[in-house]
Image: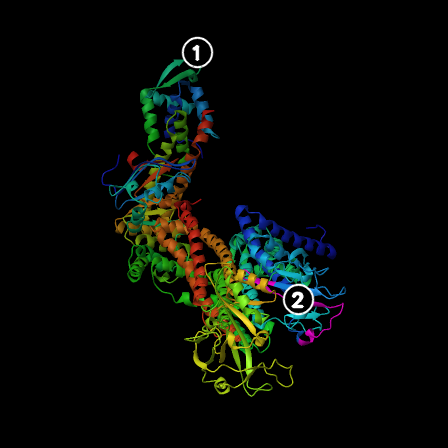
Amino acid sequence: MMPAGSLLAATDLRKAYGPTTALDGAEFSIHPGEVVAVMGPSGSGKSTLLHCLAGIVTPDSGSILYNDREMADMTDAERSALRRSEFGFVFQFGQLVPELTCVENVALPLRLNGISRKEAERAALSWMQRLEVDDLKGKRPGEVSGGQGQRVAVARALVTNPRVLFADEPTGALDSLNGERVMELFTEAARSTNAAVVLVTHEARVAAYSDREIVVRDGRSRDMERIV
Amino acid sequence: MCTVPGMSIGHTLLGLLESGPRHGYDLKRAFDEKFGHDRPLHYGQVYSTMSRLLKNGLVEVEGVEPGEGPERKRYAITEAGITDVRRWLATPEKPEPYLQSTLYTKVVLALLTNRNAAEILDTQRSEHLRMMRILTDRKRKGDLADQLICDHALFHLEADLRWLELTAARLDKLAAEVAR
Amino acid sequence: MSGEGGHLPDRAKSRAWGRSRDLGMGVRFAFTGGREGWVRAVLTAVGVGLGVALLLLTAAIPNAMGMRDDREEARHDIGLVFHQENAETKQSDRTVVVANSDTQYQGKEVRGRLMEPEGPRAPVPPGVEKLPAEGEMLVSPALAELLKSDGGKLLVERLPYRVVGTIGESGLIGSRELAYIAGVDGLAKRINGSTVGRIERFGNPEDQPGRSMDPVLLLLVLVVLVVLLMPVGVFIATAVRFGGERRDRRLAALRLVGSDSRMTRRIAAGEALAGSFLGLAFGTLFFLMGRELAASVEVFGISVFPDYLTPTPALALLIAVAIPASAVLVTLFALRGVVIEPLGVVRSTKPARRRLWWRLLLPLGGLALLLPMIGQGADNGPFNEYQVTGGVVLLLVGVTALLPWLVEAVVARMGSGSVAWQLAVRRLQLSSGSAARMVNGIAVAVAGAIALQMLFAGADSAYTEVTGKDVTRANMEVGLPDGSRVSAAVKDFEQTKGVSEALGLSSVSVGDRRKDPESSVGMTVGTCASLREMAKISSCRDGDVFMTESPEDPTALTMVKPGRTLWVEPSYSGEDPGAEIPWTPPGEVKKVAERADSLRPSLSGLLVTRAALPAKVEPLLYSSVYLRLDPSVPDATDRVLNTAAAFDPLTDAWVWESTSRSGEYQSIRTGLFVGSACVLVLIGASLLVSQLEQLRERRKLLSALVAFGTRRRTLSLSVLWQTAIPIALGLVLSSVVGLTLGAVLLRMTNIPVSVDWASVLSMTGIGAGVVCLVTALSLPPLLRMMRPDGLRTE
């Protein structure tokens, strides 16, 4: 059962890490331009759901359709290419390369897509402007604050104009004020590019930036909008 | 805290009847035990509520024990009563402060009547989030005063939501305790 | 600690106790920590152990060389020292006649002595209780072994004596030395003062000032030791830093539970101590093993007995103290820039930019020490050992000092490129120091090896050029002690298996007067066939005499006139009278041209067939037999030597070689090559360990990079670049330093400088290979770390 017109949809996902079941028949779907929060207690399988949806982890069974294409049928290289060009990622921390300057970090996905350094950095800088961190371009991640770093990471996730953005606890390491600002800029940017956002969080105030939420509990998901 | 607001005492008593017919005295004791805590129900409250429910056809009198006093009446829930409880449980509460007493009652009742208690919590969470989205949106568009006011509400809602999360995580434990 | 803190002695005692407890805790930490802890401890110990073993060996070498010299002196009999005076020793019951019958077997030198005691009180050489009777011999253990083995059959034939015992250790200079002492009769009448002499005692008669080593050889030994020790030193310095990050974190945890910074430093010191003590144990073990092994090994024709290799106690003690001490110092030095706080490790602020000038001082200082010694080597006295060692050490240490600067300077200028390149370059820019430290060992090893290979290659070719023998013309030459029996000898050799041709040539001089001739020329006597080996002779019959035309030396032309009487072996006043045999050359003396490839090149004079000379001349002839061997007979040389020995034990045979000593140098170079390769592999292992440590730290980042679509190839390539760039720089620097050092050393020994590109390439190739290997080995863990598991928050 898949809602029509969805950009990314998963049915009956199952995934186990050894004896631990992470996903036990989870469902998911998202439309372009939609922000969906994935909530649930820690260890419920939120992150695993995100990793499966993003093609980082292959589920044991179940189907994931992206643009009506079955992800399981793609090769690892194809999935990597998809992640490079159509998906964007923001994680809680540790995703910026400490040796690269901020602008180089933001330009990295473009460069991975084979775009020349100059052009990539120009695009990167314009995104950094939108996220109000363009004055950090020459700094290294170690020299900027957590909130600034996270904005740089958001800029990096957006720089390829992805169709789906995956954010895993994007404000997890930030205080409320910084977290809010990051979420605001993030969702605003996503909406302006009509990108779908999969937002994994356990924080209600972060989830409040979404259009609807999905609750994952014991590896099973509940789509709250369709029940109410 | 912890008194059940008047409007939901009827639903609570109805819910307690779902597990089987009870005398008015039994109902008061069961209520006090599960929800009354430091402020037990008055007999008068029980009888006025029961007579209202009787009038609405949600309960019926199954029999009267010999002896004096109205507490000898034995009440049973009707089909309409069961439907009413279900509807009440499924309807999320309007997000507002000090909601948890009602929610707690609902969860315990759901556990007592073998209904899905987690669903009640999820539904409520969804309602809270809906409210929070509205506030967040208002905050985004408003000035600093709006932002501060919205934030206050948001933090309270968030606290409720956390409580919901925590309760959801402890449902199994609560079920075991309620069943005792 | 103690509750009653008032008394000073008490406090002092408890403080000391606390200190040793901290050290002990560190020691325990060194070995606990699971498999990884053990691997680190063992790697450290092996690294330190190899260094210790090498140091012990070095400390033992002077002793070993001294022992060899002493024994050589003690058994000295005939030869240069005695010459004339020796031949004149009067016969008595205290004399012995000794003949040198050294020979070669399968290319190895065999020391041979024939002895004939002339009375009951005749002296015996060291290691011998009683001289062998006639027809018997004493042999060294190695020779006994050889004679019994299958490979020794031909030698058994050559030494027709019964083995009656072995020569004791005191009569030998090495465990693998091949030596025999045989008893013979009738030596006395063959005393000649050079190879046969009469002596009254063994041993150098006068206490000569200790014969110093050939300066070039000494130089080689010094450089070999320095070159092998330096990278091991660098390796030890890196080895004690293994697992540094993890240790720092552990120390931080200890700070959190209340240890102060001094205590943590002591704990770190304890860890280093544990590693180095284990290393000392390993090293002693390696050394003892190596010592036993040394007894069965022969290098440069030199072998030693295990007990020669005993380090001077003082040096051994120094090593035992210095190694742990330096391990602790290196550890404390490494901790110098680190502040261990309870909540983690804080690296001190950005280190100052590396300055070039003092780094340049080291290699320049090294050059300054070495340059004054240029040209001093060959004949101008020995090198100053300290100066050589100091210079080489400074030059090589210069590599480790220059490399961080070079890496920093080059990497800072490296620009755009692929993503993999960018990732690697940026990482290097941030931590060029640790990158340089990782390859320091390799750089030093390669620089030293290149210099050494160059030195060896140079020495090799320098020693080769001198022979000037044309091996296409003859393979062996056998000098006959009794020149008159040349034709018999030729006949014997012709019947020897493996000899395709034997040519006898004799020589004697002839002058124009009986006494004090005005001019004299050499006469070469032989058959027509053998004379044709020297000049272009068209027709020849026995009895003919020829004269080579030599414009440079017209003596023969002017002296030889038809009918004129010449004198064979004329006498010179003041010397023993010659034979003075008159000889008139036959009517016609044909002029012939010398062959370009004459057996005896540039010999002007007369070529005489046998029948042209009177029979009386025969005993005067000095004769040699030239032999061409059949290359398909592998042991032809030994068969010829057998025939020669059978003909007369005192024949003097040698093999013509266009490249003398090349074999020995080749084996040294191979050994050096293998040694350097081993050092490089060892360093590679440490490189791998630190590489994996770094990767593990970046696990989360790697997973994130993979998550947003980075190709695994890109990440693997960046790891490769990250190792390859500093290594490439290191190899370039070490090639430059190595070639410079090699050139200077060659100039010092007066050997023309030539670059041995093959060895430069092979050494840098091995260095590069190590990098590839390390990268290849770190790929599987890298791929494992790139799995998304690393993304899982907890």
Closer to the camera in the image, C259 or C596: C596
Disc 2 marks which residue?
A: C72
What element does badge 2 sit on? helix
Disc 1 marks which residue?
A: B66
Vertical position of residue C64 compared to residue C699: above or below: below
Vertical position of residue A174 compared to residue C67: above or below: above
Neighbours of disc 1 within 10 Å: few (<14), some (14-19), many (20+) = few
* Residue at horizontal 50 percent and vertical 77 percent from the top: C608
Q: Chain of mark 2?
A: C
Closer to the camera in the image, C697 or C672: C672
Residue C372 at what x, y percent from top left? 55, 78
What element does badge 1 sit on? loop
- Mark 2 and 1 residues: CB-CB less than 8 Å, in contact? no
**Quadrant assignment, res B18:** top left
Q: Is residue C96 magenta?
A: yes
Which numbered mark, 2 or 1, is in the foreground of this view?
Answer: 2
Cα distance, mark 2 to mark 1?
133 Å
